[in-house]
Image (tube, coloured by chain):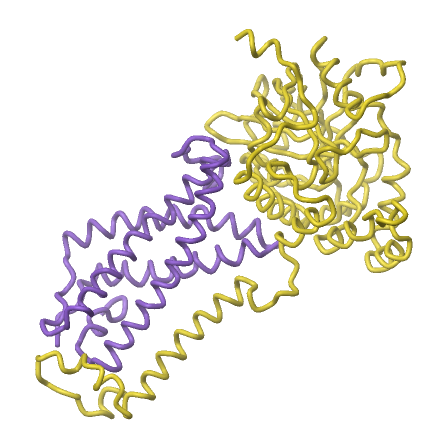
Amino acid sequence: MVESSNPEPTARQDGSRYALSNLFRTSMLPRLALIGVVLLALAGAFAATAGWLSPQRLTPEKIVARFEEYNGVHPGFRRNHAKGVCVSGVFESSGEGAAISRASLFRPDASVPVFGRFALAGGNPFMADSPAAVRSLALNFALPDRELWRTGMNDIPVFPVKDAQGFYDFLAATRPDPKTGKPDPAKMEAFLKAHPEAPAALKLITGRQMAEGFADATYNSLNAFEFVDAHGTETPVRWSVMPVDPPKPDAAPEEGENYLFDALAGELESAPLRWRLVATVGEPGDSTSDPTIPWPDGRRKVTLGTLTLDRVEDEEHGPCRDVTFDPLILPDGIASSDDQILSARSAAYAVSFREREGETKEPSAVEIANPGSDAK
Amino acid sequence: MITETFPAISRVFHWLMAVLILAMLFIGIGMVASLTDYHWLVSIHKPLGILILILTAIRLINRQLNPPPPLPADLPAPIRAAAIGSHLLLYGLMFAVPLVGWAMLSAGAYPVSLFGAFVLPPIAPHDPTLYAALRTTHTVLALLFFAVILAHIGAALLHGLVFRDGVFHSMPRCTE
C-alpha cells in the first residue's frame, strides 16, 4: 500500500536513495513518524514491564532497602538473618517420604551431605543474642546429579503475614521508635487493621514456647510446599526439623553477646546434634496459600529422615556464607505451593545476595576457632 | 536495490528467535521487579535462555550453509558498516547473554535447573566477586541487546518505508 502510493524516489543504483536529502523530504515525514511510533511503543512496553513507569509498585529492591534503612547497611552480610554460623553434616533418609515425594533424597537408604546455617532473625549482624530472638536454621542438601534442596526455617509456629505487602508493612510497624526504643503502638494498630490475618498469627508467635538455645529448638518451614510422587500426584506439606535428645540446657546464667551461638558451638564440638526432618501432611481445606494459619493438630506426620550436624564453622571459613537459602531451590519431587510469600522470599533473597556478594566481607560477630580445619 | 531474499530456513530461524528473544527480554526485566510472579518467570527464563543458546549455535551453522543475500551494491559505506556491525553485535549477544546467565548462576552456587531433575553442570567456579560481576554484566548486556533490537527494527523499517531498496523484503514472512 505504502509502496504504491508514492513513486519510487529513484530507480538509479547510485546510492542517492540513502542521502539525508531523501530521508527528510516532506513526503517521508509520516513514514519516519510511523517508525518512531513503533519504536516508542516497544520501548514503552519494556519500561512498563520493568516497573519504571510505576514507581509506587512494591518490588524486591524496596523490601531489601527497608531492611537497610532500619538496620543500616552492613557490607557483605545478609540483609536479614544477618548474624549466623555455618554447620555441616549428613541427612539419612528413612524411606518413609518416598511414597509421597519422588525426590531422590527421600529414597530408602539415601544419604546426602548437608550444610546449613543457624541464625537470628533481624538485619543487624552484631545484635546481641537474647531469649526472645527468633532463631532460624537454613539447610542445603546436595543431591546426586547436581540437584540441590535449600530451605530456610524458623522457630516460630506461623508467619506473621500472608503476602509481601504485609511483610513490608510489618517491618515498619515493628521498627523500634528511636525515642522510646519500642515500636510505635499507633503504627502497630494501623498495621493490624490493614492486615487482618496478622493479629491471630502474632498471638501464636508471641505465645510460643521458647527454646533455651539453638540446639533444642524446632524449626518450621512455615510456608506450605507440594510433594510430588512418581505419578505426579501432589501432596501439600509443611516440614519441621525437630531435635532428637537435645543437650540439657546449661544451668549457668546466660551471658555474653553471643551466648546462644557459643552454646551451640560448644555442643557441636563435644558431640554431633541429631534432628528429625518431619513432613506434616495437609488435608483438603488446610490452607497452603496462607502461612499465618496453622494446620490443625493431629495431621499425619511423616518422618523423612535424620539430620546429623557434626561440624561448626564461622561464616568466613564455612560453606554457608556465599550461597542464598532461596526457599524455591527445590529438587524434582518438591514444588512450590500457591503461597505468595515463597516467590517474594525468592525474589528478595536474590536482591540481598546480589548486593552482598559484590561487597567486601567483614568477619562475623560469631567467630569459631577451628582446630579441626587447621590440622588438615 | 536487491531482489534476492533470505533462504526459507533462515527466515524460520529469524522469526522464531525474534519471538523467543523478545519474550526473554521482557520476562527478564519483568521478573526482577516482581514478587509474586518472580518464581514462575524465573522457571521459564532459565530453560528458555538455554534454548536460545542452542538455537543460536544451529543458526550460525545455517548461516554458513545458507548465506544471506548481499546488501545493495550502492549502500553507502557508513550504513554498510552499521549493518554489518549491528548484526555481529546481535549474534554476539545471542551467545553472550545466556552464557553469562549460566556462568553467573554457576558462580553464585545456584543449581542451573532446567526441568524435572535435569540440572546443567556449572561453567564457572563458585566465587562471590565473580557472581556479582556476572550478575551486573547479565543485566547490562540484556539492556544493550534490547537497544540493538530496537535499532535493528528501526533500520529494517527505514529500509522498507524510506530507502525501499529491497532489504526489508528480503526477510519476509516465516514461510513464503
Q: Is residue A147 left or right of residue A191?
A: left
Of residues A348 and A376, the one drawn nearer to the viewer in this rendering: A376
Look at the image and give the colour of chain B: purple
Residue at the front extreme, as displayed: A179
What is the quadrant of the C terminus of chain B in the image?
bottom left
Q: Is residue B112 left or right of residue A296?
A: left
Quarter of the image holding residue B33? Answer: bottom right
User: Residue A346: image x %, image y %?
Assistant: 61, 45
Q: Is residue B21 left or right of residue A21?
A: right
Figure check: B136 above or below B113: below
Residue drawn at (37%, 62%) of the image: B19
Of residues A136 and B67, the one drawn nearer to the viewer in this rendering: A136
User: Residue A123: image x %, image y %?
Assistant: 71, 40
What is the quadrant of the N terminus of chain B in the image?
bottom left
Figure check: A82 above or below A307: below
Residue drawn at (45%, 74%) of the image: A41
User: Residue B81: image x %, image y %?
Assistant: 19, 64
Residue at the top extreme, as displayed: A375
Supply the letter of whichever chain is yellow.
A
Residue drawn at (68%, 35%) of the image: A82
Residue drawn at (86%, 21%) of the image: A254
Quarter of the image holding residue A225? Answer: top right
Of residues A352 and A156, the one drawn nearer to the viewer in this rendering: A352
Total tally of numbered discs in the picture:
0
Figure check: A342 above or below B128: below
Q: Is residue A303 left or right of residue A254?
A: left
User: Residue A356: image x %, image y %?
Assistant: 58, 40
